[in-house]
Image (cartoon, coloured by chain):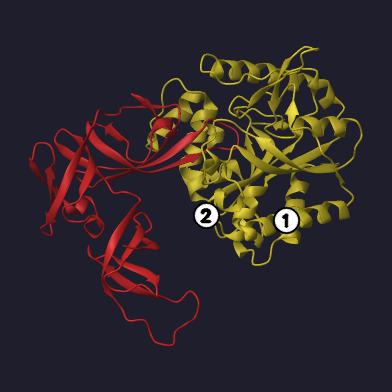
Amino acid sequence: MIKAGQIDKGTALLIKGQPFICVEREFVNPGKGSAFVRLKLKSPSTGQVLQETIKSQDSVEDINVEMVDYQYMYNDGENFHMMNVDSYDQIEVPMANFEGYELLMKDGETYRCTVYNDEILDIQIPSKVVYLVAEAEEAIKGDTVQGATKFVTTETGLRVRVPIFIKQGEKIRVNTETREYLERVNG
Amino acid sequence: MDRNAALSRSRLYAGIRRYFTGKGYLEVETPTLSPDLIPEATIDNFGTWFVNEFATSREMYMIPSPEIFIKKLLADGSGSVFEISKCFRNCEQLGQVHNPEFSMLEYYTVGFDEKDSIALTQDMIRATALEGCPQSVLADFEVMTVHDAVQRYAGIDIDLLQNPRDLRKAAEDLGLPVPSPEPWDDTFNRIFINFVETGIPKDHPVCLTDYPKQIECLAVAQGNYRRRWELYINGIEIANCYLEETDPDIAADYYRTEYRKLVELRSGNGKTIPDTDESFCDVLARLPKCSGVAIGLDRLLMVETGAKDIDDVLLFPFSRML
């Protein structure tokens, strides 16, 4: 058991016998009174979402998860195919449970995963990732307005708004949480 | 350096000082380091030591609010006063709407009750609003009692649920798990946070008045409620106001029960247990009729500038200094 106040994004909990991952956590304090946490929990196997607001001092059942490195191989439109880098065991992870992750994960890259009972509950994507610009619109000539932007598409298919000087074949660093451009990466 | 954040704060503070001094309030400066505090079980404190090798060393505490000193000034006949003060609350989470060190505006108006303070606060916020301040801040306050808000957003009548067992049953019927036993005010807060805080409108300020008397504080009790209000803007709690308690016996009772609760909650977990001084209750007996308002200035800056996180209005957010 852990106190609700210890729950963070990514903490795995057992609720009515089913594993859930905390995807959002917000602290709430009434003007006078005990501290509360507002949680958004998601079941990786069913996609069910729960919203709970409980006292920080309430006890909740956490689960012993393993952190395992998996290599992302490819997706078939329905499942991510992942390989355990130690045992070479392969598993399929339903894409519906990790919406939009196909735009952020790179083929062949290794990701740390939260595993419980041989099921991947969470895939950790670093908050800043370097992507290759696979397609870039041509900047409109003469458009020298400061702060002018355009869209590019990364090798993973992610569309990102970038400054107009970014060209195809260059590398950019992206904030994976907001999916916003951070900077150009040289070399 | 975030020049805009610095400018917004500077302009807001200048406006606030102009507003209150123009109305004849005296600006005061009181200590942030105190040898004792008003006991508040759910507000954790920062403790430190005054050390002097030639005198007695003693523990001191960073104030969670300047209330204790301002009330001493009022009792000594200061008349209406205001203060912009740094306040400190320990064990708070970081970011969103919390920073362990924050800025508070407190103003106490002699002769006012809490209802008068609503009109004053509305006027002050409008008169000092920054350029570009959204309508959700400037619109008329919607004033609603907590009883009516709970009825509207949770569908229950708390006047009929005055004992902990009945309130727990109502909370469970609303789908909230409640451990047993749980004090009435904790169960109430579960309902309040789940239904009222999330339900109240965000396109205009909402002033919730008359909080249940079971939530102990130094505001005057009347029937099942206390004469205090809290102001919400954009769903964020911005201000708190009391009709100040002046009965020394009631205040002494509060000191004892709240201190007992505080010691119970903080023993054995390394949390600071501040000294309290019950003679403060005699100070309250000399308090003129007055109403005090406390406004979180960082939060007011957030709603006026559209900042989503308190860190965006601070030049040195606590979270980024660690």
Could you tell me which secondary element the residue under label 1 belongs to?
helix
Badge 2: residue crowd in 10 Å (few <14, some 14–19, many ≥20): some
Q: Quadrant of residue A87?
A: top left
Measured from the top left, where is residue A37 in percent x and y? 45, 37
B305 over B73 or under it: above or below: below
Chain to which mark 1 belongs: B
Residue placed at 87% from the left, 47% from the top?
B25
Residue placed at 22% from the left, 41% from the top?
A113
B175 over B305 or under it: above or below: above
Give the residue type at disc 2: Lys
Which chain is red in the picture? A
Residue B162 appears anywhere in the view: no
Query: Which of the two residues, A101 or A23, is positioned nearer the viewer here?
Result: A101
Residue placed at 7% from the left, 40% from the top?
A89
User: Would you say the residues marked 2 and 1 are in contact, meaning their CB atoms lie under 8 Å apart?
Assistant: no
Measured from the top left, where is residue B202 in percent x and y? 54, 56
Residue placed at 65% from the left, 18% from the top?
B259
- Name, please, the residue furthest toward the front: A187
* Residue located beneath label 1 in the image: B10
Chain to which mark 2 belongs: B
Q: Tell me, for residue B308, which label it has, or none.
A: 2
In the image, is B184 to the left or to the right of B314?
left
Q: Tell me, for residue A82, which label it has, or none.
A: none
Could you tell me which secondary element the residue under label 2 belongs to?
loop
- Marked residue nearer the N-terminal end (2 or 1): 1
- Give chain B's shade: yellow
Q: In which quarter of the image is residue A63?
A: top left
